[in-house]
Image (cartoon, rainbow, N blue to C red):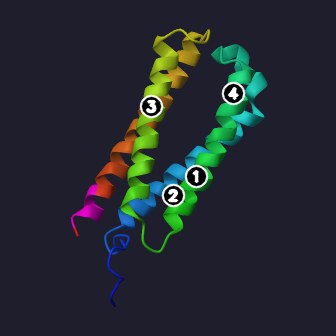
Amino acid sequence: MSTPTGTRRPLETDNAGPLRTVLRIDGWSTGVFGVVMLAAAQPLSGPLGLPTAWSIPFGVAMLGGAAVLGLIAGYPRIPARYAAYVVAGNTLSCVALLVLVFADVIPLTGLGTAFLLTGALVVAVYAGLEFAGLRRLQTR
């Protein structure tokens, strides 16, 4: 099979299995977390100190992110640039969560601080695993 000159083909999926798996798990967990943030925004506001005005947009953004992750994981061949976008997005999310905790932007409780720090850790782990999967894709 040949490709026209000047076009780029996505990397083959023969070694994308681990990346695809991490993308799917990341997508499902992001979706579940988004639903929890939307459904429990009011009840979690007091114990976490996370205002409902912040929880609702976070939840919506997470549902959108989950959909994108699912779409990328469903590609027959995962384009390396899409995987790189996911790694960058997760890295930025991790940094944003850390900024929210340490910049005192919102009045978090101790539990809220632990909640956001745990979220930052989880997102960092996903970014690391997806980066490793991206590197594996690029070795072929």
Q: Choose between 44 and 140: the one closer to the eye.
A: 140
Q: Could you tell me the amino acid type at mark 1?
A: Trp
Q: Could you tell me the amino acid type at mark 2?
A: Arg
Residue at x 45% of width, y 38% of height: 123
Where in the figure is residue 135, as x and y percent of width and height? 26, 56
Quick check: marks 2 and 4 in contact, CB under 8 Å?
no
Q: Which mark is residue 94?
A: 3
Q: Is residue 138 left or right of residue 28?
A: left
The residues tagged by marks 1 and 4 sit, at their Cα atoms, a distance apart of: 19 Å
Q: Which mark is residue 24?
A: 2
Q: Which mark is residue 55?
A: 4
Q: Quadrant of the C terminus?
A: bottom left
Disc 1: which residue:
28
Where in the figure is residue 62, as x and y percent of width and height? 62, 41
The residues tagged by marks 4 and 3 sit, at their Cα atoms, a distance apart of: 16 Å
**In the rendered structure, which disc, 2 or 4, sits on the residue that comes first in sequence?**
2
Q: Is residue 11 above or below residue 39?
A: below
Where in the figure is residue 37, as x and y percent of width and height? 69, 33
Quick check: marks 1 and 2 in contact, CB under 8 Å?
yes
Q: Is residue 85 left or right of residue 48?
A: left
Q: Is residue 96 above or below residue 104?
A: below
The residues tagged by marks 2 and 3 sit, at their Cα atoms, a distance apart of: 19 Å
Count neighbours of disc 2 (C-alpha within 10 A) and say few if under 14, some if 14 to 19, many if 20 or more: some
The residues tagged by marks 2 and 4 sit, at their Cα atoms, a distance apart of: 23 Å
Viewer-nearest of discs 2 and 3? 3
**In the rendered structure, which disc, 3 or 1, sits on the residue that comes first in sequence?**
1
Residue at x 35% of width, y 71% of height: 8
Q: Which residues are magenta?
A: 135-139
Q: Which mark is residue 136?
A: none
Q: Secondary structure at mark 2?
A: helix
Quick check: marks 1 and 4 in contact, CB under 8 Å?
no
